[in-house]
Amino acid sequence: MKRSALDGTQHTNFIYLLPGLLLYAAFVFGPIVAALGLSLTSWDGLSMPRWVGLGNYADLFSDSRFYIALRNNAELMIFYCVLPLVLGITLAACVWNLKQREQLALRTFLFLPYIMPTAVLGIIWAWLYNPAFGPFNQFLRAIGLGRFALPWLGDFNFVLPAVGIVATWYFFGFCMVIFLTGIQRIDPSLFDAAKVDGASARKTFFWITLPLLMPEIRVVLLLTVIASIKSFDLIFTMTRGGPANATLVPNIYMYQLGFELNRFGAAAAIAIVGALLTFAINYAIHRLVGSRSKGVA
Amino acid sequence: MSRSSNIPAALFLRLLLWLLAFVTITPFLLLLLTSIKSKADVLRGAFALPAYPHFENYVDAWNAGHFNIYFWNSIIVVIPVVAVSVFLGLLTGFAFAYLSFPLRRTLFAILTLGMMVPAEAFIIPLYYEMRYLGLINTYAALIIPQIAMSIPFSTIFLASAMQQLPEEVLEAAVLDGAGRFHILRKIVIPLMIPAMSTLALFLFIWTWNEFLIPFILVNDDAYRTLPLGMLFFQGRYTVNTPVLTAGAVIVIFPLILTYLVFQRRFIAGLTAGATK
């Protein structure tokens, strides 16, 4: 059956498809499949790979460092996902009824971090946090809070929130922008009706805005969760996973195992676990947030 | 949500919002300020103003910090990646929007897989593939994988934009006896200019910011792009903060410029792409 007036015979159709698909197969899909295969072997990058079946995965799940990496990643999700979501939705609700020009200006400023390379942001924040001449501690001393001036990236207890705050700073403006467009999509008569009924601003937010923003909440959650699982650039440039594994995440561990210790099979196994985790969370968000939004609409 | 009738509270809220906006861009302001300081100025405090602006930091970063090399490398990489990705996205997008072929759903699923699986997951096989092809430490190592990685998004973005084109126009062109390449070139592409430029904008930002691909596939300073150059520069110049910050400004200045010029289109495209 023809899909459109432009449809032709199948082998001429393939001419359009082939260049893109071949390139994609050779440099993305092929390597993904190869990573899956590699994760079932033990390989040092030089000798022949040795088949070990699920050995790498078994090793991983009895490896305490891998659990530390997973736990750190889970904690980082508070900063990557929860805080930007809450901040973004609150801000969108505040900015929403400002005048067009002011709204645009605020949006422009708050969104700015999102277009920057995270690797460079990591380097900039490493400087901001520098214990000796970093602006952050200088500011704390200037306002009389010098006793809180810590070596942020060297402190075992505070390094994870210190790195996490950068992710929050990176994402919250992005979340706000998505939520703003979401609010603009909502039928204004709903807000008018609430006003006529004498609903308070808070009630309107929790009973109209929030439920109707579920599709946007889902998108924001998906993107930030994926970003937290693939977090590498920011953490690598700020702490390299240290001090003492305090900011170790799976992708940093993958890099260490693969490119520093030449244990490529084990490294590939981490990469695959990360990809599977992404799929699982993706699916869970679709089920949980998706179905609820359908129930409301 | 209703317009606040409480005037002082509303004013306080706006003040708070602007304070937050100011705090958000403070790292960038500090970056700019520090980049025009002397080393002695830096010791006087992060917030102190320099006696006069030291623009020579930029010259130092550009020359001694090799940012001239990194900057041109970024340009050399970003142009073909954006151009070829948009072109290939048009072809595959055209196929997915209008044409029938076997395994359509399977191919689409395989394509979206590439959008979900991060580069970190397949960087090891990719590294060895590039090494086997003798492409480590070449521009090709920076360009080809990034084109391949952009194909899923380009395809889906352009295919869904094409599906919104009026069918009658295309049917009329077919009735006039125009060939498909001709219709693509003369009718579809002109109508797709807005979508294509939004896509190009995204690809520009992503490619300019890419870290992992150049980090793993290139270790020769002559091929490093800006974010990578910045990392190695940081290693060499830890004590020279003014020159380091000048380097950071060189990396982010093109991004800020692009963002300010295209900001409406950028945000519209972002939300369209994200909520799809």
Image: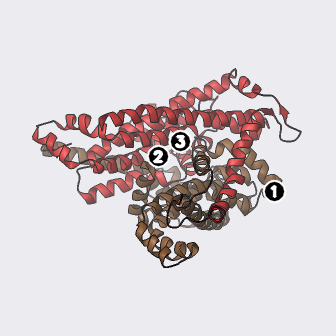
Chain colours: A red, B brown
**Quadrant assignment for the C terminus of chain A:** top left
Residue in front for this viewpoint, B227 or A208: A208
What's the chain of the residue with tag 3? A
Q: Is disc 1 surrounded by few (<14), some (14 to 19) or many (20+) residues within 10 Å?
A: few
Q: Are marks 2 and 1 in contact (CB under 8 Å)?
A: no
Report the disc number at residue A170.
Answer: 2
User: Which quadrant of the structure image shows residue A145?
Assistant: top left
Badge 1 element: loop
The disc at residue B190 is none
Q: Quadrant of residue B264?
A: bottom left
Q: CA distance from mark 3 to mark 1?
A: 31 Å
Question: Which amino acid type corresponds to the residue marked 1 in the rendered image?
Answer: Leu
- Which image quarter holds the N terminus of chain A? bottom right
Pointer 3 and pointer 2 on the same chain: yes
Which one is closest to the eye, mark 3 or mark 1? 1
Residue visible at 51% across and 54% down?
Answer: A116
- Residue A291 x/y as whole percent: 39, 33
Say what amino acid the circle numbered 2 marks: Tyr
Q: Residue under circle 1?
A: B133
Observer-nearest residue: A274 or A4? A4
- Circle 2 — which element? helix
Q: Is residue B130 above or below residue A297?
A: below
- Label 3 and label 2: CA atoms lie apart by 11 Å
- Residue A251 screen position, x and y as percent: 64, 37
Farthest-out residue, right: A47
Horizontal side of A144 relative to B56 (left or right) equals: left
Residue beneath disc 3: A227
Q: Residue at 15% x, 45% y: name it.
A: A192
- Residue A57 % position (x, y): 71, 27
**Rendered residue at 64%/59% (across/down):** B147
